[in-house]
């Protein structure tokens, strides 16, 4: 992990060309002013979080982003039949693997919602190829979870981790940023892209990644050919075409 940790904030550098030290002796004076690595992406800083908050307060801002949802399937059933400790350590492991994969591709781990996570790409660290990055992150999450769950199953006797698979959904496009909940820190993207990504995730089989046509078109060239299928997603009047990655 150490090698992938940036010494300066990638968000501040790419948005404003200001080097904000995150690690090492140069970061100490910054830390005195509360500027430190963000919890949503340790390669961005708390100024970026503030910027995100300000963007959100403007209410009308829209940003072209990719949104990824990943959900740990079988977790609810498992939590009914096993002790809280063993099951929650499984969830922590899932969050860890997701975070590592997301940060590797400069995404933001925006939210953890029960046994699911939501990630945003292209903000605050901009990347033209954000759709492709989201797809590669999805694959990395699948790969990491596969190797991690077998280790966990061995540790937690009597727990069949092979029943736990990850379903992933991704959509790309213009999204608004809005504020939810009571905490001012609870900011996130809202709109069709977010709900479509969430629905694609719920349509995905364990181990599967389903993306919309917008994602497929943008990531094409980097990902193998895929045939779309129509899905009737909850809350959508017409069928939505999704592509397995
Ligand atoms: Zn920053």
Image: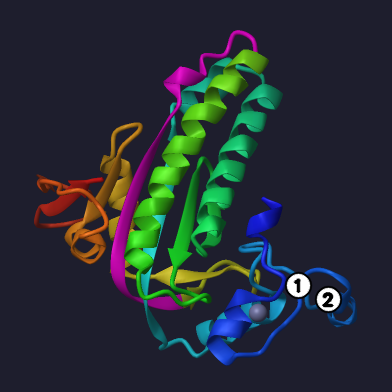
Residue in the picture at 26% in, 47% down: 210
Q: Is residue 168 magenta?
A: yes
Start-end of magenta stretch? 157-177
Q: Secondary structure at mark 1?
A: loop
Residue in the picture at 21% in, 57% down: 212
Q: Is residue 73 above or below residue 232?
A: above
Q: At which x and y percent is residue 144?
A: 50, 37
Q: Which residue is mark 2?
A: 27
Q: Is residue 98 magenta?
A: no
Q: Residues under labels 2 and 1: Cα distance?
A: 5 Å
Could you tell whether 70 is left or right of 8 in the image?
left
Q: Is residue 234 above or below residue 145?
A: below
Depth order, front residue of 49/184:
49
Q: Quadrant of residue 174?
A: bottom left
Mark 2 residue's CB less than 8 Å from ligand 1 = no
Q: Which residue is mark 1?
A: 22
Ligand 1 is found in which quarter of the picture? Answer: bottom right
Badge 2 density bin: few <14, some 14–19, many ≥20, Cα 10 Å: some
- Do the residues bearing badges 2 and 1 touch, measured as CB atoms within 8 Å? yes
Most common SS among magenta residues:
strand
Q: Quadrant of residue 62?
A: bottom left
Residue in the picture at 48% in, 74% down: 123
């Amino acid at each position: 992990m150490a090698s992938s940790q940036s010494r300066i904030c990638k968000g501040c550098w790419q948005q404003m060309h200001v080097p904000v030290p995150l690690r090492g002796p140069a970061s100490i004076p910054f830390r005195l002013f509360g500027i430190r690595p963000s919890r949503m992406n340790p390669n961005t800083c708390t100024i970026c979080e503030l910027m995100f908050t300000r963007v959100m307060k403007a209410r009308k801002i829209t940003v072209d982003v990719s949104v990824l949802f990943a959900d740990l399937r079988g977790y609810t059933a498992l939590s009914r039949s096993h002790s809280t400790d063993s099951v929650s350590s499984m969830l922590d492991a899932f969050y860890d693997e997701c975070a590592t994969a997301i940060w590797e591709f400069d995404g933001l781990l925006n939210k953890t919602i029960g046994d699911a996570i939501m990630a945003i790409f292209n903000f605050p660290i901009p990347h033209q190829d954000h759709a492709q990055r989201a797809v590669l992150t999805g694959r990395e999450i699948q790969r990491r979870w596969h190797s991690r769950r077998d280790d966990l199953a061995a540790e937690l006797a009597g727990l069949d981790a092979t029943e736990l698979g990850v379903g992933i959904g991704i959509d790309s496009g213009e999204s608004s940023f809005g504020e939810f909940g009571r905490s001012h820190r609870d900011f996130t993207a809202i709109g069709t892209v977010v709900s479509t990504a969430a629905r694609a995730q719920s349509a995905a089989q364990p181990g599967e990644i389903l993306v919309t046509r917008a994602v497929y078109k943008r990531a094409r060239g980097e990902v193998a050919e895929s045939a779309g299928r129509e899905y009737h997603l909850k809350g959508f009047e017409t069928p939505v075409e999704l592509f397995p990655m």
